[in-house]
Each structure stands twice: as structure tokens, then as C-alpha cells.
Image (cartoon, rainbow, N blue to C red):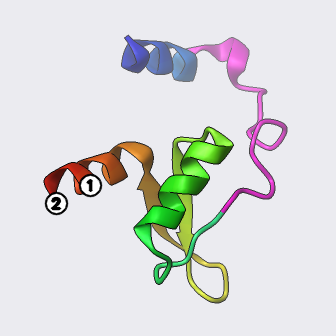
Amino acid sequence: MMKQWISSLAASDSNKHLSISPWMVKNPEIVFPYQPLSEAAQILLDKRITYLPVVDKNRYLLGLISRSRIMRILNSS
């Protein structure tokens, strides 16, 4: 369902003028790779967000950690 919606949104000429910048989060919560998984989980819960950017000391993006990924990790240990 979501995939279909995104495909139709991308194909629509009426949405070609919309840019990302008004909708993006300009100062997102971030975590560093050395932080405990429990801290990332707490931020995700407290802020009611699904993903957290993982950055290095220069704040360059290394990857993302998701709420569902943390749940899988905790359930497997």
C-alpha cells in the first residue's frame, strides 16, 4: 500500500514542484556509535521517532538505527 502510494506520488506531475526542505527535520536527534543501545532506545521512545542518525565526531552520517532494529536486537539476546 505505502509502496504504491510513493510510486504514484513520484510519478505525479503535480508534485514535481514540491521540495524537501520545508518538511525535513533541521536539527534531528543524533547518536554516536559508542553510545549504549539503551540510550538510543530511550531517545526513540521519548521523542516518539522511528529512526536516529548515527554520526561520527564530525557529525558525518554513518548510518541509521531504527526502533524496530533495536527491538530485534534486544529480542535476540
At numbered mark 2, what does the secondary structure look like: helix, strand or loop?
loop
- Numbered label attached to residue 74: 1
Q: Is residue 49 above or below residue 3?
A: below
Provide the residue span drawn in magenta.
12-29
How far apart marks 1 and 2 lie (CA) works out to 5 Å
**Which amino acid, by three-letter code, is at mark 2?**
Ser
Instruction: Name the image quarter holding the N terminus.
Output: top left
- Main secondary-structure element of the magenta-colored stretch: loop
- Say whether marks 1 and 2 touch (CB < 8 Å): yes
Q: Is residue 14 above or below residue 29?
A: above
The front one of 28 and 18 is: 28
Q: Residue at left 46%, top 66%? A: 63
In the picture as drawn, the residue positioned furthest to the right comes out as 22
Q: Which residue is mark 2?
A: 77
Q: Is residue 28 above or below residue 39?
A: above
Image x and y of residue 66, in percent: 43, 50
The front one of 33 and 35 is: 35
The number of callouts visible is: 2
Does the magenta-highlighted stretch encompass residue 35? no
